[in-house]
Image (tube, rainbow, N blue to C red):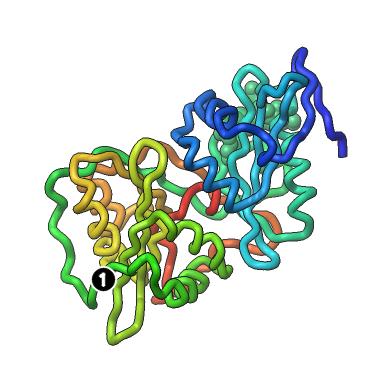
Amino acid sequence: MQRSVRLKSFELVARDINDVDVDLLHALSISVRWPHRPKDWDLLRRAGHGIVAVDGIGRVFGSAMWFPQGDDFATIGLVITTPRAQAQGGGRWLMDQVLEQCGDRNLALNATHAAYPLYVSLGFTNEAIVYMRQGQVQQTLPPLPVLDGELSELPSSGRLGEITELDARAFGTNRARLLALLSEDASIATLSRGGEVVGYSMCREFGRGHVIGPTIARNDQDAVHLTAVHLKKLAGRFARVDTREKDGVFAEFLQQSGLGIAETVTTMSKGRRFLNRESNGPWVYGLASHAWS
Ligand SMILES: CC(C)(COP(=O)(O)OP(=O)(O)OC[C@H]1O[C@@H](n2cnc3c(N)ncnc32)[C@H](O)[C@@H]1OP(=O)(O)O)[C@@H](O)C(=O)NCCC(=O)NCCS
């Protein structure tokens, strides 16, 4: 694998993403109008691996990250080339190296429109559309469906085991390590029926406000309640939910709560199929983030 690349007049080499100052990563994501704060990059770096393309004086021109989840699966994200160096082969060069690092793992990612042709050419295939919904949360939420079960808050010291197991059924892979990291700074709601946890949701600060996800539920009504718990506390503030629900009770609820569709991305996979929804089984209604699929 070629470890350096020439983009216009810049000779770039690949470095580990942990070797650069977080402010340079922040500047990179701002250059493509992404909302990540330095704190968000810190969490991403704790959660996964990655590379950056740097020039001889340490300027960062691109990034790509991957996140091992379980033994044989990984998600890819934070694939960025700074606008002045785009369309010169940098994105492909970064991806080739990340794919090499991922080895024979099955892979999934959420492709923006700009990156879609690149991933198709690398052998990724389409699975679903993700709707990025965001906006200022309404002061009064729309009427909620009847609650079936009991909502509670999971203490931060608390029983992550139960939600991790449920999450693995919905997500398809046990992502205990990622959930433990997210839980450090998230408020977590659970929904129980007959003493069994049947859904959960996390809410944490991200970008311009708060993101609600992962949200795991068995049906739209449960997902609405698990999301509303957090939205109630965010009235008038900026919130985001990434979901694959195009329409239905949950999508409608988000719309009426002030979270309109800002953008769509395409969930793609390489290797084994990623999304496998069981009828009546737990399902990912809200994504942890684009990078964690
Ligand atoms: C997506 C992105 C990383 C691509 O980076 P890049 O350095 O421009 O990519 P490359 O130059 O290696 O091009 C890769 C492929 O994209 C396509 N492409 C790139 N620039 C293009 C352009 N101006 N017009 C049409 N297609 C283009 C081509 O299919 C190209 O394939 P080729 O190698 O066969 O020509 C970059 O546009 C970017 O950072 N965008 C904003 C952030 C983003 O959306 N990231 C993706 C997250 S999933």
**Residue under label 1:** 152
Residue at the top extreme, as displayed: 9
Q: Residue at x 32, y 70 (%)?
A: 190
Task: Name the residue type under label 1.
Answer: Ser
Kind of element beneath mark 1: strand
| 96 vs 219: above or below | above
Which image quarter has ligand 1?
Answer: top right
Give the percent coordinates (x, y) of residue 96. Answer: 77, 41
Name above or below for residue 205 compared with residue 216.
Answer: above
Is residue 79 in view from this perspective? Answer: yes
Q: Is residue 104 left or right of residue 17?
A: right
Task: Using the image, determine if residue 207 lies above or below residue 6.
Answer: below
Name the foreground residue: 106 vs 11: 11
Using residue 147 as the reference point, say whether residue 156 is left or right of it.
Answer: right
- Between residue 283 and residue 75, name the one nearer to us: 75
The residue at the point 44 percent across, 58 percent down is: 184
Quadrant in which residue 149 is drawn = bottom left
Left or right: residue 222 versus residue 113 is: left
Farthest residue to the bottom: give it: 194
Q: Which residue: 49% across, 62% down?
A: 179
Residue drawn at x 35%, y 54% as measured from the top left: 203
Could you say where residue 34 lies in the image, as x and y percent from the top left?
48, 32
Q: Is residue 114 visible?
A: no
The quarter of the rendered structure image containing the N terminus is: top right
Q: Quick check: 223 left or right of 147?
A: right
Q: Position of residue 122 (x, y in %)?
A: 73, 44
Outermost residue toward the right? 1
